[in-house]
Amino acid sequence: VQLVESGGGLVQPGGSLRLTCTASGFTFRSYDMSWHRQVSGGKERELVAVVSSSGSTRYEESAKGRFTISRDNAKNTVDLQMNNLKPDDTGVYYCAAGWTTGYWGQGTQVTVSS
């Protein structure tokens, strides 16, 4: 099993980034896929957005209206489009498959700063 995140970087407040998670080694279409954020020094990863295996989506409150999660089952990818970024969005973003599998990527750093 492998989950590889890409697309992080440094962006100014108000800017946009698109994160991509590429999955392999499991039946991607059968799993809910999610993005999580861990802030520097934080102990826990907080859920940012999830897209279920059936395609329904759910967002953390501060992400609503700014972030969009989508999946492509043909390509085994899940994207997180992040618009109007704020400094509080800064952190390491991880993608995960399922809820109890323990399948996590290595993370990609997002820094929102002027």
Image: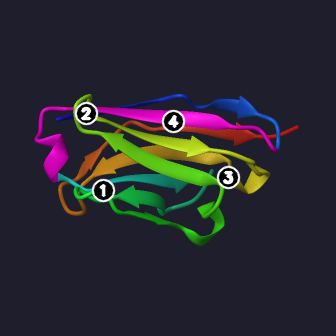
Question: Residue at (77%, 38%) from the top-left corner?
Answer: 15
Indicate which disc, 2 or 1, sits on the residue closer to the N terminus.
1
Q: Compute the Cα span from label 3 to label 2.
A: 25 Å
Q: Compute the Cα span from label 4 to label 3.
A: 13 Å
Foreground: disc 3 or disc 2: 2
- Quarter holding residue 2: top left
Which residue type carries mark 4? Leu
Q: Which SS class for mark 2?
A: loop
Q: Residue 89 carries which label?
A: 3
Q: Which SS class for mark 1?
A: loop
Indicate which disc, 2 or 4, sits on the residue closer to the N terminus.
4
- Quarter holding residue 5: top left
Indicate which disc, 3 or 2, sits on the residue closer to the N terminus.
2
> Which image quarter holds the C terminus?
top right
Q: Mark 1 points at which residue?
A: 55
Q: Name the residue under label 4.
A: 19
Indicate which disc, 1 or 3, sits on the residue closer to the N terminus.
1
Q: Which SS class for mark 3?
A: helix
What stretch of residues is rendered in magenta? Answer: 14-30
Which residue type carries mark 1? Gly
